[in-house]
Image (cartoon, grey):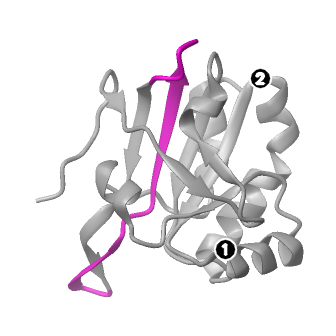
């Protein structure tokens, strides 16, 4: 069984390459609030909807002092194509070995068309990163729906 995180849990630290190959770490956001969302695959309908919705709301998130990071198992080259094609306004990170996803409970058994399969569990976390760069989970949401998710998250955060 996949371990799931809850509000108040320490957020697992990570360092992953972005679409340009630059390493992005949770600790880079010391003193900030970060939305980290995990999605199955760039350039698929649901994942595109979610990324486009986060991009549309990026100014509001930024104004509220909230950074957004998307993480998938896609290769950096595919993330770069996705970022360019859809005009994504925030970093997309590559977790090719799925280690970060597993540490967040965002990879494991899930239902897909009525069958149990192993894969990325669409999940979103709001993380408060302290001045030392350590994160604490403020909100943990698993099995989120791509459509309407960003609007609900903005409501939850008062953005």
- Residue 151 position, x and y percent, is 67, 45
Whether residue 121 appears in magenta in the rendering, the answer is: yes
Q: Nearer the viewer, residue 9 or 63?
A: 9
* Residue farthest along the front direction in this orientation: 22
- Residue 58 position, x and y percent, is 82, 43
Is residue 27 left or right of 140 when viewed as pictured? right
Q: Which residues are magenta?
A: 113-134
Report helix, strand or loop for mark 2: loop
Q: Residue at x 83, y 33 (%)?
A: 60
Is residue 9 left or right of 27 when viewed as pictured? left
Q: Of label 2 and label 1, which has the lower sequence position?
A: 2
- The image quadrant of residue 137 is top left
| Residue at the disc numbered 1 | 76
Q: Residue at x 55, y 37 (%)?
A: 26
Q: Residue at x 56, y 30 (%)?
A: 27
Is residue 135 left or right of 7 when viewed as pictured? right
Q: Residue at x 69, y 69 (%)?
A: 49
Q: Which quadrant of the figure contains the N terminus?
A: bottom left
- The image quadrant of residue 36 is top right
| Residue at the disc numbered 2 | 64
Q: Vertically, is 74 above or below 54? A: below
Q: Label 2, label 1: how many angstroms apart (C-alpha)?
A: 28 Å
Whether residue 101 appears in magenta in the rendering, the answer is: no
């Amino acid at each position: 069984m996949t371990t799931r995180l809850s509000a108040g849990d320490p957020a697992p630290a990570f360092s992953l390459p972005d679409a340009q190959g630059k390493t992005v770490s949770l600790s880079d956001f010391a003193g900030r609030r970060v939305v980290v969302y995990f999605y199955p695959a760039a350039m698929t309908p649901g994942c595109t909807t979610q990324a486009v919705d986060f991009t549309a709301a990026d100014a509001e998130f930024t104004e509220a002092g909230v950074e957004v990071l998307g993480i998938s198992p896609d290769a950096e080259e595919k993330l770069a194509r996705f970022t360019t094609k859809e005009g994504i306004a925030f970093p997309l990170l590559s977790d090719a070995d799925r280690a970060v996803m597993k540490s967040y409970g965002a990879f494991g058994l899930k239902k897909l068309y009525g069958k149990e399969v192993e894969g990325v569990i669409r999940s979103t976390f709001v993380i408060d990163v302290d001045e030392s760069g350590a994160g604490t989970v403020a909100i943990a949401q698993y099995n989120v729906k791509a459509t309407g998710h960003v609007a609900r998250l903005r409501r939850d955060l008062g953005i």
